[in-house]
Image: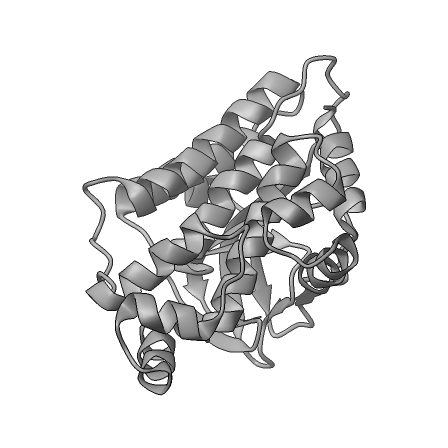
Amino acid sequence: MLHDLIAYGHKLSVLRLPKSDVPLHAMAISAGYEQRVNEVYSWDGLQRGTAPFLVLQHTVAGQGRLDFAGVQHRLTPGQTMLLSLPHAHRYWLERGQSWEYFWIVLNGREALRIARAVIDVAGPVLTLSQGVIDRLAAACLALIDQPAILPGQASGAAYSAIVALHDGVFSTGAEPRPALPAAIARATAYVDANLAGPLNVARMAGVAQMSRAHFVRQFSAALATSPSAFVLERRLERVERLLLATDMSIVAIARATGFANANYLAKAFRRKYALAPLQYRNALRSAVGA
């Protein structure tokens, strides 16, 4: 299907669909197949509005650049970029370079849930099998090749794309990811099981049966983040799920996720998502017609 998309040629499609009375929780917003050559092309993940959405972009030829929360990536042919917005990132074309790619922009709570699980375990830059890439290309082609696409068709293409990513990362046939050292895995499991309670580095080190200093070094080497940053990230992920899946108050969510109070939760959430928690909940539900 990638060959078919390339043969189809460059095209952009912005979908203007009526909002359904029955919510569809994975929806395509736009799609395209483009080539950029030695031009200004730069997107800032904190300057694209407040409603949560996803960008899926696969490099066919040339190369682009991505700064993802301070980590630099070079996007080369065969690599797929997956981003959840709002988020602190920027991707761009370097001066004098070219970048050919196809892309799909999606929203909806189910698409966001799966995409963020993918990013959590595999990062924002994926190397997928040709079969998965063909499925992504087929979804893109379905979106740009139908001038009068219906909401259900657009949602079907969105689901096709997001579950292709799921299969590419989580299926048993995928390339296995390196396992964490047993001691570090015990600590991360302890964090996930005790997010509502107090979590400190000394306790995590005790679970791992290491000294505090040795634990911090080993944890940071294994996960490329500090123990305290890991705990905060896990708590914010739990907050996001509770915002989307429940009608719990911010006070109740703070208690359930180990934040000292609702104000502290709101400040931490805004730093990551560029939205207050209730704004985030309302923006997403409005986007999917919930």
Name above or below for residue 103 compared with residue 249.
Answer: below
Residue 161 position (above or below residue 184): above
Residue shown at the point (52%, 40%) measured from the top left: 113
Residue shown at 54%/33% (left/top)? 110
- Residue 239, compared with residue 43, is above or below; it is above
Picture coordinates of residue 269 (x, y %)?
A: 70, 57
In the image, residue 86 lies at what x, y percent? 69, 56
User: Of residues 14 and 98, which is closer to you in this image?
Assistant: 14
Q: Is residue 101 left or right of residue 132?
A: right
Q: Position of residue 263 (x, y in %)?
A: 79, 58
Q: Is residue 196 left or right of residue 5?
A: right
Please indicate, yes or no, whether residue 83 appears anywhere in the rendered image: no
Residue 85 screen position, x and y as percent? 65, 53
Query: From the image, which quarter does the C terminus lie in?
Result: top right
Say which residue appears at 64% left-offset and 36% top-offset. 244
In the picture, measured across the screen, residue 232 lies left or right of residue 130, that is right
